Image (tube, helix red, strand yellow):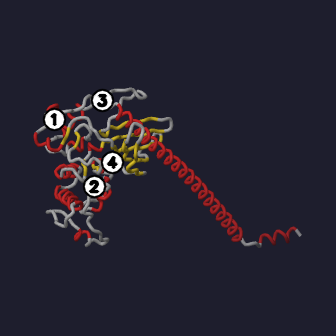
Amino acid sequence: MRNKIKEYYSEIPVRENGIALIIVLWILTILMVLALSFSYAARTEIYSTIAFRESIEEKFLAEAGIQRAITELFYHQMYKDQTIELEGLDVWKTDNTLYDIQTGGGACTIRIMDEMGKVDINAGSEVVLKNLFVNSGVQPEQADIIVDSMMDWKDPDDLHRLNGAESDYYMSLPVPYKAKDANFDTLEELLLVKGMSPEILYGNNEKAGVIDFLTVNSRQRRININAAPREVLMAVPGITPELADTIINLRQNSIIDSPQMIALPPESLNYIITGEPTSATFTVTSTGRSKNKKGGYTVRAVINITGQDNYRILSYKSPATTNK
């Protein structure tokens, strides 16, 4: 009997044993792939949750920065010509100075800019506008097109400037529209103007845009030298980079109340005003950052201070682009 059993099993083909082994290996491979897939999916979900949480935290930090800036603006309006202590800090400046606020779980950087320190696209000088574009990297020929087209966009007639554009040009575009023939209401309207591009307005990874230096709120042709950032100062005829730095250093400690204080060249005088800025409208840019993380979430708001404890938000962008 034993011999018969032995003979029976000895007759089973060896190849069947090989097939069984292959099947087992395939099953193990499939199980390993499934396990790795589940592991990858779980890890991706965890990372996504962490990124979402950090994004929400950064947004809240940025919004908190806006509220902090509004508080500082109330103090700024009340104590323009005095120095007070607020949590160890002086009255904040409104010339685009950077303030870095640290918290337990992150930080926010805040800039406040007086609208009188910007170039008003409705009332500002064409010369200053062109210089601002050229200094930001725009070719002079394209800057001429943009500035002339801006003037054509807001004037009431259909007459073309040398490099400008009126409704006939815009109506020939794939998506046609007419020139406004009225003042700009927002800075984003500039994207409708011939020659303008998002890269020029907002900037990119290689260069900053011009949006931070333009406004529709000052309604002034001249720029207040005590509020203008370096980029705007250098757009004024006659103000060199060295003179711009001198102006910024001088106003750290005192208000420039006359052109003679800094020996402004004659060609600059028609484009600037001195003295304490009287504006009640400011742009606040706040960027929230998680701890030890670059980048962040940016919110930009235009705030109008209407009283000792009242304000209006004229515009609010979240998230907002920021200059590099």
Name the N-terminal-most of marks 1 and 4. Answer: 1
Q: Please give the residue where the numbered disc 2 appears in the rendered image.
A: 200
On the image, which quarter does residue 303 sit in? top left
Mark closest to the chain's N terminus, 3 or 1: 3
Q: Secondary structure at mark 3?
A: loop
Q: What whole-number distance in Å separates the C-alpha atoms at marks 4 and 3?
A: 30 Å
The image shows residue 220 at horizontal and vertical percentages of 23, 47
Residue 36 in which image quadrant: bottom right
| Residue in the foreground of this view, choosing between 78 and 128 | 78
Q: How packed is label 3: few (under 14 Cα within 10 Å), some, or many (20 or more)?
A: few
Tell me the SS state at disc 2. helix
> In screen coordinates, is 249 left or right of 281?
left
Q: How many marks?
A: 4
Front of the two marks 3 and 1: 3
**Mark 4 vs 3, N-terminal side:** 3
Residue drawn where x is 47% and y is 45% of the image: 58
Left or right: residue 141 versus residue 39 is left
Give how far apart the Cα atoms at labels 3 and 1 are. Answer: 19 Å
- The answer to the question of whether label 4 and label 3 lie on touching residues, with beta carbons closer than 8 A, is no
Q: Secondary structure at mark 1?
A: helix
* CB under 8 Å between discs 3 and 1: no
Which disc number belongs to residue 69? none
Whether label 4 touches label 2, CB < 8 Å: no
To which quarter of the image does residue 145 belong? bottom left
Coordinates of residue 313 in the picture (x, y in percent) = 40, 47
* Mark drawn on residue 323: 4
How crowded pointer 1 is (Cα within 10 Å; few <14, some 14-19, many 20+) is rated as some
Q: Which mark lies nearer to you, 1 or 4?
A: 1
